[in-house]
Amino acid sequence: MLPARPADWSVQDSAELYGISHWGEPYFSVNARGHISVQPQGERGGSLDLVDLVQGLQGRNLSLPLLIRFDEILQDRLERLHGAFERAIAHYSYAGRYQGVFPVKCNQQRHVVEELVSCGQRWHFGLEAGSKAELLIALSLIDDPDALLICNGYKDKRYIETAILARRLGRQPVVVIEQHDEVERIIQASQELGAAPLIGIRAKLSTRSTGRWGSSVGEKAKFGLAIPDVLNTVEALREASLLSDLRLLHFHVGSQINDIGVLKDALQEAGQIYVELTKLGAPMGFLDVGGGLGVDYDGSRTATAASTNYSLQNYANDVVATVQECCEPHNVVVPTLVSESGRAIASHFSVLVFNILGSSSMPCAAPPSQPEEPLTVRNLRSTLASILTSESEDGSDLARLQEAWNDAIKFKEDALDAFRLGYLSLPERAMAEQLTWACAEAIVDRLPPQSAIPEDLRSLRAALAGIYYANLSVFRSAPDTWAIEQLFPLMPIHRLNEQPTRLGHFADLTCDSDGKLARFIGTDGQAKALLELHHLKGKEPYLIGMFLGGAYQEVMGNLHNLFGSTNAVHIRLAPGGGYQVDHVVRGNTNADVLKAMEHDPELLLERLRVASETAIQQGGLHISEARRLMTHLENSLRQSTYLQE
Ligand SMILES: *Cc1c(COP(=O)(O)O)cnc(C)c1O
């Protein structure tokens, strides 16, 4: 079979190359125009062309980088999660319910939490808080008396009292005892207030997890009670007449469980503890399986770090079936199942789109020919010419390209020898080098997309790899790529009907050499260091999307080099087609980030005004220059921290 030629490149080839059907379904795909299209309601609704959307937003003066949030994806994730549990419950005839909560720490943005609470109402979907501030969010947003409000994290007396009083408000707060000394504070606060909260216990399981968060379980885990402490706590509650409020058992295996086997072991252990707690006289009623439901970032469906070897339905089935198996032999009524799935709910709904400012690469342009060029330079020129005309369809292209490359290498070596011996001038050597790179590039442009390419020629691509300068801060918008080498799908959002003939990675705006995106989805769960990208075309924008970053990235991001938050928008399909912009959340201005560091922007301006006055007096600066300088400074205080077009 003839290798596919660049002209035959189709959008399906791009979809395969970037794996979008593996990690993007059902929300992201490639359309016939070679753009990414977004289906915010999955298979059930319309689609939006992401490039048109970005242009529409730019027209509204929302500059890149842009965080685009699709609230309908959040809703769809909630529906899928509940659907999976409903199916599992029906399939196993489980005699209980599922009632989830969203762990607020995953994405505390007001519009995000509000959206989840409002579309989760029909399932009495609740929230999980890990700090006083998160508790405040949860308390103020949930007014459904049936929704759970799980209180995790370290708790002082005020936290506990707040939770107790919230129960009086008609909420359902469950104070989860995570440290052995918390039970004393709960007892004390309950006695003082004459009311008790619903109480939960977080157990330290012996189950070993794998992956990054493996140490979240086991004896050395930061949170949870060891079994002797669980027993002591039960006795302390019994003595204080609070055992009747012990309603929930909680465990958390760590985020992004890659291997379903780990979850099964944990569920069996927790199921037995649950049964034992009911035997000790606690009314119980809820088993909270924590977070950890994973996201298949690379679409490989493997038990590797960026993936999971199970589906949402497998997860729900295992939770339901295992808990039932634990309870039935003991005639214990099965609990309401609670999960605190954060990543699985929030990852998909936001897309970060950033533009490329330029790229560095080998100097591949052929230099104009000079009269009386040395032989090596002329040889390289004719080699280049032969590559440029090797467009035949007879399948011998690869052999000819390989031969041409061997020639080019030989001529370049000749040129270097000649330079060393003093026969070639510096400009002539530069010409020889440039022509060699021009040959390399011309060959790479003519290589078939995949198939059997000789190793030499394949590595030419990597040798020509460029750095693409991205208008973003990794530390602000994708901190986990830096902190824990997290892999996110990254790909151009347009030009997908053109073969990407270059390889490259992204460097961000910060002055930090760690500020780069250089891990991409490879094959079989292996990451790769270079991504297939397109040549930049003059001033034409080149737009890249980072996907599945809706969980944890925003809040973990920091102000390194004082790059602030990006503009964010909430988009929804409009009833009559197209889209509507629900909310615009303006990114930080330069004044915002300066203030965050206790600088006073007005004072900074004033100092510079005084300095320019002095320079004007001394004749170093013209008045019109001073005005221009002050205008730039004043404007930039009001503007985004990112580069403007
Ligand atoms: C972080 C956390 C979660 C959320 O975990 P995901 O993996 O995002 O689902 C749930 N529960 C607790 C106690 C956590 O600390």
Image (spheres, rainbow, N blue to C red):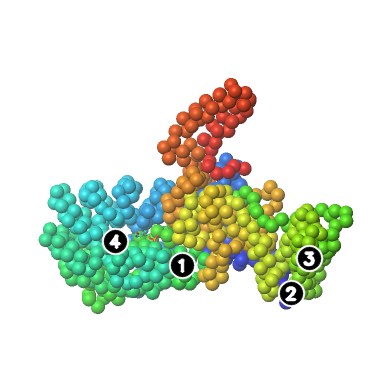
- State the CA–CA distance, disc 4 to disc 1: 23 Å
- State the CA–CA distance, disc 2 to disc 1: 37 Å
Nearer the observer: mark 4 or 3; the answer is: 3
Q: Amino acid at mark 4?
A: Phe
Q: Amino acid at mark 1?
A: Ala
Q: Amino acid at mark 3?
A: Asp
Q: Which residue is mark 2?
A: 2
At 35% from the left and 60% from the top, the residue drawn is 340
Relative to 178, is 497 on the left or the right? right
Label 1's element? Answer: loop
Badge 1 density bin: few <14, some 14–19, many ≥20, Cα 10 Å: many
What quarter of the picture does the N terminus occupy? bottom right
What quarter of the picture does the C terminus occupy? top right
Q: Which residue is mark 1?
A: 305
Nearer the observer: mark 2 or 4; the answer is: 4
Relative to 535, is 153 on the left or the right? left
Q: Nearest the camera: 198 or 445?
A: 445
- State the CA–CA distance, disc 3 to disc 1: 48 Å
The image shows residue 54 at horizontal and vertical percentages of 59, 48
Badge 3 density bin: few <14, some 14–19, many ≥20, Cα 10 Å: some
Label 3's element? Answer: helix
Q: Which residue is mark 3?
A: 414
Please tell me whether residue 206 is drawn above or below residue 36 in the rendered image. below
